Amino acid sequence: MEQTYAIELHNITKRFGSVTANEKVDLEVKKGEILCLLGENGSGKTTLMNMISGIYYPDEGMIKVDGREVRIRSPKDSFDLGIGMVHQHFKLVDILTAAENIILGLPGKQILNMKQVNKEILELAVKYGFEIDPKKKIYQMSVSEKQTVEIIKLLYRGARILILDEPTAVLTPQEADRLFEVLKNMKKDGCSIILITHKLHEVLSVSDRVSILRKGLYIDTVKTSEATVESLTEMMVGAKVELNIDRPEPVNPVKRLELKNVTCKDINEVVTLDHADLTVYGGEILGIAGISGGGQKELLEAIAGLQPVSEGSITFYPEENQSKEIANLDVADIRALGVRLAFVPEDRLGMGLVGSMDMTDNIMLRSYQRGKSNFLDRKTPGELAQKIKDQLEIVTPSISAPVGQMSGGNVQKVLVGREIAQKPKVLMVAYPTRGIDINSSYAIYNLLNEQKKKGVAVICVIEDLDVLLELCDRIAVLCGGQITGVLDGRTAKKDEVGVLMTKHEKGGVSHE
Amino acid sequence: MNKEPMFHMSKRESITLGKRIMIYVAAILLALIVCAAVIVGLVHMNPLGVYKAIFDGALGSSRRIWITIRDTLVLLCIAVGLAPAFKMRFWNIGAEGQVLIGGVVSAACMIYLSDKVPNVVLILLMLAGSAIGGLIWGLIPTFFKAHWNTNETLFTLMMNYVAMQVVTFCICFWENPKGSNSVGIINQATQAGWLPSVAGNAYFWNVVIVTILTVAMFIYLKYSKQGYEVAVVGESDSTARYAGINVSKVMLRTMAISGAICGIAGFILVSGSAHTISTSTANGRGFTAIIVAWMAKFNTFIMILIAFGLVFMEKGATQIASQYGLNENASSIMLGIILFFLLGAEFFINYKIERNRK
Amino acid sequence: MGTIIIFIQKAIVQGMGILFGAEGEILTEKSGNLNLGIPGIMYMGGIAGLMGAFFYEKGTENPNAFVGMLISLICAFLCAMLGGLIYSILTITLRANQNVTGLALTTFGTGFGNFFGGSISKLAGGVGQISVSTTASAYQAKIPGLSKIPVIGSIFFSYGFLTYVALLLAILLSFFLFRTRNGLNLRAVGENPGTADAAGINVSKYKYLATCIGAGIAGLGGLYFVMEYSGGTWTDNGFGDRGWLAVALVIFAMWKPINAIWGSILFGALYILYLYIPGLGRSTQEIFKALPYVVTIIVLVFISFRKKKEDQPPEGLGQAYFREER
């Protein structure tokens, strides 16, 4: 008899404007198996899963559940088909208990019998091996407990197909192991589980099969038993693509910035950057690679003065034999020390620019205090805005149009243009070309190279490994808040970076 | 499976000034039609006669014109004070209280200092004192907001009523004549502490002070470094920190300015028109001004138009009421109806509604 | 002894109208809507109830107290709900700012109440001071028998039926919010509408219903002042600042209806305390009258200082909710 799949996707294509997020993807999940969905950032994994959970509707293709063709138009449709997804951002109400969150929105008797609900939850927990206190409030819970609530919520509602989006990204190794035990129990019970992850050792230890996506394309599905770290890495990152980005030789690099033992914690006291050591030289581009959430954001923000540093030092060297300590200073303090530090943050319109203001007002965001006068000097920034607009060929009706109305590429040009105009000693750029068309991307690479030639120390977080390998002189790889290696950009291999990005042990190998 | 709705709405990227004005004009017309219907329903009056009466009430004689101007100025002054706070997305609902405190300080100066210092000094002291009073009243909630993120909407709201009790507390000492439970006209004989008439016009200085504040606030918000900081803080906390702005400091400074101007509005009320103090000195203007500031989107010149429009309607409605023996509260009803329509109109400025195509 | 009993009685009488307002506002705020129109809504409820009873008594030969009571109750509730509906349409459907809309509603509602209160007799053809004594008698009727018991009768059973309705409502509201499925869903809507939406809850429907019904309940507070407190007559601005006290009480009760019961009595007591402390000068009395607000501010600071999650305002309070456009 032919095996019926729990869920099948055929020829699924999804486009957002001119960008194709998924093209002709096929995917099958059997009953009682764990399928890993593997791919780099931006490979289209989450988009694909959002189509199963009813958040997006595919442009082309067919979805079958239990062998029947279905249309999933809303999260509710997906629910009714027994599909549930645990997102990276939990959807829980903080002041309610676990049990209350689990039954939220469900039909049933008006008067709540929480005793009965708690009992049912504990039964589920025992069945699959969860640990949970149904009466505990969400805000008192650790991240892993919250995740447990999310999973039980789905099971309680009768989900038989579960999608978990990078569930271990927020867990300690012990918690992750416990999660995998539970997932195996659910598998034994006949549930189908789709696990999105980047961590190869997890893929190899828990899954039955692995499907690989790359840049929106479906690559292959293999049996885990026949896969190795190397074979999976190769499929995930693909063959090297020639981009022909310029990379001038660094001239006379000098030490500009030194991080020693830098550790950061988030508001929940979770370590986000773990004893990072890094040296940055003027006249080179240092690339930062890593899976999202690996500590890249914290690294840049710690240097920029936007992230408290709980341990370690960040030293800036204006000249040889001179040094200035900038850890735990805020932006104004750093500026007052005369440290010219430029930063293009990841959240362009939420941090780097004010969307409702025009180009001139945005250009002066980091320099408006200059001069003794109590009044703003709009003339100089206005001229600069015009210059940046002309030089970077920014498409906008005028420099007095709100930047929020510009396209992503133009917004980024305004931001990069402004930061470069400060004549920085250190230039930090987070995801310089994310969501930006090819031509603008090359324009921005050229800008970074120009800065490098001027002797600026450029630090660049980039997710596309092909770009990283062609643009950067050195590449530091972050994983789980640790620097797992620093490679020479000219000799590094793509899979070498890939392995370091997913290497989750303490004391990464140094290739310096 | 699911039925598609007939319409869907999407956020507008931008809107032309013409269209924006058209939407507001349509809203006001609709509001006036509803108001007229209400009035006609109540008093069976010819709707056109209604509008003539409104016009007469607000601008029918030079005395009425000046009263309309006087009340517009006070409303405008408070709205100008609120502008920087709202631009910073700080919900200062406490203007009413800040105005009252400013008024109390002015009245106190008039009562206790009138025979001790020359009149010019007295008036300057009143001006400064009322500003400081309003400033303190505004800073108290801000201090807690900056340090512990205490909800400023509710805190400033409560401060209004504490201020009212402060006023009644003072009335106990100042009441004149005794037992009247009101202060009466202060310094009626000497007119000490009254803003003097210039060329026979009692409201000359009111015009001067409020005009200066309106223009100054416009310049402050648009051209000063501090005003720029206010705008950035209002937009996003993380952008402000990225720009190197100390958010708490800006918050305290801005609310100091906001409170001080509201306090000065209290001074104008006491020294420049009422010459007395009571709990109804502010008479809800602190709340109405919130609506003025909000709808003008912090542009102080647009506030002039809105403040005038509201006072105009209020005076007109009062006129109708007295003409037909109705009570003066009719104006609040009309004001409410107009505000509802204007608030609803904002939706059509921010969103566009499209018919779903099959 | 006698003074203390009267003091407690008077405190309860003062408190109940505020309690109605606070109950309505708690229900509204639990849905994430900060309705600052509550003071206006209370005026609307009060005048509508009075007018309903007035036209009934005027149009009937032998008005029946019970019928008058029913009519005034329904009129008050519906008219106050209309206020809630205006607020809902503007803030939920048209996404207008909640604070500004609420203040506009208070302007409107207060004017509405005072206007009709002041001109009702003229509209009805000049009958002088209006009074609906028959209907009011139904509101002021005390429980026969029980109210005669010494001390206990005076403290517990010497009020009109609305007092008991207010107390019962607080208990029911508490039960609804914390023990029923719809109550749970409503709390989720006020805390985190995005999550509630994802769990399949119709956010707009919950907000509309909570705001309108909350307004209706607050309207009964107005009715209480008109009928039981004032005996069926209207005084301009007769509620004073009690509408704002209701908003303050919501904070003081930390959004819990049961707390609002004793909170309302405490507020009522603070409101009249100055009358019962011998030797107070008039000025000191005025300082005493500020106490409910000062106490509320202290509570507000305290809860932000302590940061205990359960005592915070609903997290989504004051913010409009729109689902992300897809």
Image (cartoon, rainbow, N blue to C red):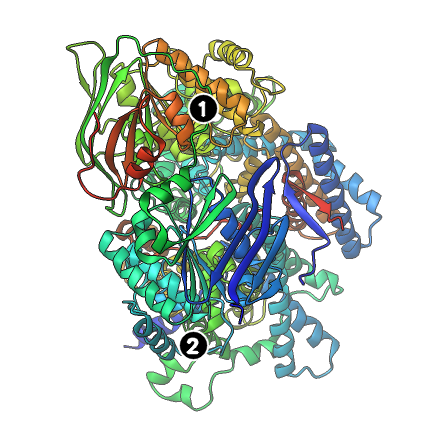
- In the rendered image, residue C322, in percent from the top left (x then y), is placed at 55, 50
Q: Is residue A512 above or below residue A281?
A: below
Q: Farthest residue toward the left?
A: A321
- In the rendered image, residue A40, in percent from the top left (x then y), is placed at 41, 40
- In the rendered image, residue A139, in percent from the top left (x then y), is placed at 31, 57
Give the residue displayed 70% in from the left and 36% down from the top: B58
Q: Secondary structure at mark 2?
A: loop
Q: Quadrant of residue C292?
A: bottom left
Q: Is residue A118 above or below residue A277?
A: below
Towards the viewer: A298 or B234: A298
Q: Pick the quarter of the image with the C terminus of chain A.
A: top left
Residue B132 seen in render: no
Label 2 packing within 10 angstroms: few (<14), some (14-19), many (20+):
some
Give the residue displayed 29% in from the left and 18% down from the top: A335
The residue type indicated by label 2 comes to Leu
Give the residue displayed 59% in from the left and 22% down from the top: A401
Disc 1 to disc 2, C-alpha distance: 53 Å
| Left/right of residue B86 with respect to residue A56 in the rendered view | left
Chain ID of residue with mark 2: A
Are discs 1 and 2 located on one and the same chain? Answer: no
The residue type indicated by label 1 comes to Gly
Residue A112's tag is: 2
Residue B227's tag is: 1
Give the residue displayed 69% in from the left and 40% down from the top: B313
Towards the viewer: C4 or C106: C106
